[in-house]
Amino acid sequence: MNCRPLDFVPDPPLTTADPDPVELHAASGSRVILTCDHASNRVPQALAKLGLSDALLARHIGWDIGAAAVTRRLAVTLGASAVLAGYSRLVVDCNRDPDDPSSIPAMSDTIEIPGNRDLTDGARRARRAAIFVPYHAAIAQLIDESLARGGVPALIAIHSFTPSLGGRARPWHAGILWDGDGRIPGPLLEALRGDAALVVGDNEPYSARQPAGYTVRHHALRRGLPHVAIEIRQDEIAGDAGAAAWADRLAAALKPILAADALYRLWQK
């Protein structure tokens, strides 16, 4: 397991020596908000890497490999605002409901997480207050500011997925996740599938019709905002060149969709 004994103070999880829990890129007047729930594999100093080695934290259990690089480049190309979570999904998962036990997992993909064993309710609340709450507050503020200007923003969530899970290879280069509101997902699927070299999943390898994903459901689906979640296979974007190529590919596909004024309206089931 490459785990080591723990020696950490579990509460509070962040100190003044730790970076901010949110990386925010606010584009004035933008109608598009990008989110990246699993942008970092950083762990607060007080949590002593959760008892894991650097090698384990660098794996897909610690973060969405390549997703942050795609998000940052895509934000610049689209002139969009972006909100990126500053700490590992193993500390607290910003894309899980706070009441979901998997939001602070004791095990991930067969790997035990020593620093998440036997946590008190107070320790779990402290992590959420320090990391989860500021991240979602930043997203909500961008949405509220856009609505206050009289505009309905579009939300695009960027994720990545491991090329294999449970010993099974995943053939998709990317997946488009959505539930009901197809205003962005429909034309985006069509645009990406126009490249015969790509295998693009429709609610594959995950489905937005399952309630696990918190960010899109809470901020976009609940409020009727146009939205989509995009999953990219990690071996496609693990390096800078691949991340840049996918950001440019997504920008080319999204720009015509996002240019339509009719998109920016509230959706109702």
Image (cartoon, grey):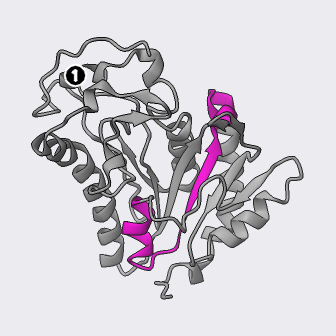
Residue 158 location (% of width, % of height): 53, 50
232 in magenta: yes
24 in magenta: no
- The magenta stretch is 214-243
Q: Quadrant of residue 190?
A: bottom right
Residue 202 location (% of width, % of height): 70, 62
Instruction: Give the number of marks.
Output: 1
The answer to whether 8 appears left or right of 87 in the picture is: left
Nearest to the observer: residue 70 or residue 90: 90
Q: Quadrant of residue 237?
A: top right
Nearest to the observer: residue 10 or residue 155: 10
Task: List the residue tagged with mark 1.
Answer: 45
Residue 164 location (% of width, % of height): 66, 36
Amino acid type shown at disc 1: Gln
The answer to whether 9 appears left or right of 217 in the picture is: left
Query: Residue at image x 24%, y 27%?
Result: 44
Query: Residue at image x 48%, y 31%?
Result: 110
Judge whether 193 appears above or below 8 on screen: below
